[in-house]
Amino acid sequence: MTDQDRNRPFDAARASGAGGNAETRPALSVVVPVYNEEENVRPLVSAIRDALAYTDSWELLLVDDGSTDATVALAEELAEQDRRIRVIKLARNYGQTAAMQAGFDHARGAVVVTMDGDLQNDPADIPRLVARLEEGFDLVAGYRERRQDKVITRKIPSWVANRLIARVTGIPIRDNGCSLKAYRRELLDRLHLYADLHRFIPAMAAATAGARITEIPVRHHPRRHGKSKYGLSRTVKVMLDLITVKTIQEVRERPLQLFGVGALGACLCGIASAIAAVVAHLSFVTQKAQSVVFPGVSLLWFGLAFYLLMLGLIAEASLKEELPRRRGSMPVVREVGGK
Amino acid sequence: MSGVGVEVSRAAVAAPEERGDAPVSVSVIVPVSERAESLTDLYREFSAPLRAAGRSFEFLFVCEPWAYPLATPVADLARAGEPVRVLEVALSAGETTLLKVAAAHARAEIVVTLPAYRRVEAEALPTLIARVEQGADIALARRWPRRDSWINRIQNRVLHALIGRVAGAELHDIACGVRAMRREVLLDLPVYGDLARFLPLFAMREGYRVVEVNAPQHRGDIQTRIYGPGIYLRRLLDVLGLFFLLRFTDKPLRFFGLIGSGFLLSGAAVLIALFIQRVGGEGIADRPVLLLGVLLVVLGVQAIALGLVGEIVVYLHAPSRRPYRLVRTSSAGKPER
């Protein structure tokens, strides 16, 4: 296989991962992004192997996200010994979202489970997730009961963030930060992750792919080896991402509405300022300089309204190019009647 | 040789034998875009060390329309049996396009990009090629030791300090333009327009291994360069564009949202202060700072709205994009397919 084959965009890579000989296709794919986890790789793989002893039809995809330690070497050694283990090596550290998407693109199972590579998730929960998925869901999210992390820097920000995300997106998932999740293949085919959207997978899955989602409690262990790769600094980023997700959820097919509402608001402010200007002019303005401020403010608001309308039109134009092509492939979940 | 209307993507996947006859070990690409010295002299000078090192090579001169006549003597060389090819592209589309077109047509898996004017001494080429053969994806020539005037060196320092901050890359001579690289890398990189200059930065961003190799500066390159203010302004815009392209292409709201909330919050602060004064009984109709406050809010909303449009566009293109690049996959020695 040449480099070019490997790096073909997305859909092609996915087709090649999912296609091929049906007999070699496992029932379950476990996707684990790893980044500098040399101490955790071996225990992780043996824990997963133990947890999946009940079935033989599984594969494990270790997605190396540009590790600089011995992680890859160890993982490839394990892959040599066990045909069910595959290693996917990314060219640099892309972050968790891209690593997960790489795993999804190469996973061949009908069910895909993701988890963290630091052993804080327990592979023993996988069978329960899969069982719940088979009850008729597209996505089963784990939430960490009795979370074993630092209170100030991890648990409190996470609690606030989860409340906020649930509130804003309308998807009542208790723990968006927990990587342990199970997905149906058909859902993943419709879900495209980029940037840092892994924190918003349930919201994106529900809004853009119509996923049926539920959650179950999972175990959580304290970190045994290595260092946590997160900190407090992401708050602002998460807030901005949340605005992004909300926008995609609400207006991805009618952005002009959003910008229209904004323009209306700006117009109202402009009218209010104009009235203030007239009132001021009639009642108390004595100097020439005074007659500038309120009319100026009014003009600024009208300028904003105009700008937002124009921007809304550009957004609509960009949809027109993309969406009609894509909507034809919207899956039909159920058909009633006919013959 | 008539105009070659080139379709890069198709040529890019063509097997070597379809790109030309006998495979060669290195293709030297000379884009003739803005400025050019005598192409035949260039060929004689730079092919000598390759010949001396016993390498098989070809020179590809890729010309924009205005430069077609410059290539006429090169065509004579080709008729005389020298390993040179001339590709005339249909329209002027910048150096990056020329490089990509040439890469699609190159016969060798290692290519050298060589400006149409002299930057480094010709002996540097074999070293650069060797570095790529040893495993680097791109080997950049760095003109070192510099023998030109201090003005050039200061300009160079300032530009690279800026780039270093923006791209997080420690490179010293990005303008040199003499580089050896794997053909595939050149085809794969998301560069266009004027971005050829920053090609190594995009390569690093994609996780390719980039190394710098010191190369003696060419005698002909030693001169004082002072440009018009327009050029400096363009370089500054380049750095801004680079900053955005390298970091925010898949998350525009992180960029516009941060700027926008800055404006919005400071505007809100001004308006709140005014509101408090108004409630306290002070008139605000004669306070120009009200204009400032509203202006800041308006700018903030504009920046955020623009960021949202960016996000919608990125979302729309997500299904056709690949957010990562693979180095390899392994599955117990069994091929993937």
Image (cartoon, rainbow, N blue to C red):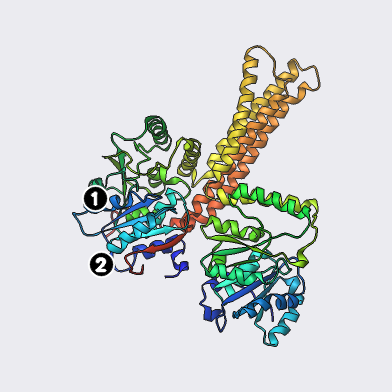
- Parent chain of label 1: A
Residue A108 visible in this rendered orientation of the protein: no
- Few, some or many residues within 10 Å of mark 1 (<14, 14–19, 20+): some
Separation of residues labelled 1 and 2 (CA atoms): 21 Å
Sequence-earlier tag: 1 or 2: 2
Residue farthest to the bottom, as pictured: B80
Where residue B256 appears, as percent x and y from the top left, is 59, 41
Residue at left offset 49%, top offset 36%: A233
Query: Which residue carries the number 2 mark?
Result: A23
Residue B200, image quadrant: bottom right
Where residue B283 appears, as percent x and y from the top left, is 70, 15
Residue farthest to the front, as pictured: B145
The amino acid type of the residue labelled 2 equals Glu
Q: Which mark is residue A134?
A: 1
Residue A294, image quadrant: top right
B216 relative to A94, above or below: below
- Compared across the picture, whether B53 is left or right of A295 comes to left
Per the image, label 1 sits on a secondary structure element best described as loop
Residue at left offset 66%, top offset 48%: B161
Where residue B24 appears, as percent x and y from the top left, is 57, 80
- Few, some or many residues within 10 Å of mark 2 (<14, 14–19, 20+): few
Quadrant of the image containing the C terminus of chain A: bottom left
- Compared across the picture, whether A238 is left or right of A269 comes to left
Q: Nearer the viewer, residue A27 or B41?
A: B41
Residue B213 visible in this rendered orientation of the protein: yes
